[in-house]
Amino acid sequence: MYNCTSPIGIDPRNIAQRIMEIRSHIAKEMAEDLSAISEENARLMRESLTASLSFPAFSPEEDSPDGSGQPAP
């Protein structure tokens, strides 16, 4: 009926080369992303540790209403 097809030249070597180039590019991007994730994780851990160490020390005198350190009756 419709025979509009023409033979398409497929070069397996060229296709394989392109696939390997794309694979290499993706691998480089993933390595960069993993490095960024590692750096972000370290930064978040430092922030968390700094925040946990910066809380003021608990003083019972500050917590009691009359400042005597004794709980309210």
Image (spheres, rainbow, N blue to C red):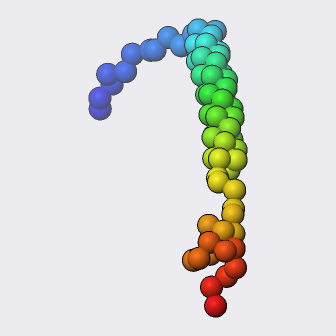
Q: Residue furthest left?
A: 2
Q: Nearer the viewer, residue 4 or 24?
A: 24
Q: Is residue 3 visible?
A: yes
Image coordinates for residue 56, horizontal then vertical, percent: 65, 54
Which residue corresponds to the image point at 68% horizontal and 50% vertical from the top-left? Answer: 52
Image coordinates for residue 54, horizontal then vertical, percent: 65, 47
Q: Nearer the viewer, residue 38 or 52?
A: 52
Image coordinates for residue 28, horizontal then vertical, percent: 64, 18
Split into 4 quadrants, where in the image is the C terminus?
A: bottom right
Image coordinates for residue 40, horizontal then vertical, percent: 62, 34
Asked if 46 appears above or below 11 in the picture, the reply is below
Q: Nearer the viewer, residue 73 or 32?
A: 73
Residue 49 occupies quadrant: top right
Asked if 15 appears above or below 49 in the picture, the reply is above
Q: Is residue 48 visible?
A: no
Which residue corresponds to the image point at 32% horizontal and 22% vertical from the top-left? Answer: 4
Which residue corresponds to the image point at 61% horizontal and 13% vertical from the top-left? Answer: 21
Residue 60 occupies quadrant: bottom right
Q: Nearer the viewer, residue 5 or 25?
A: 25
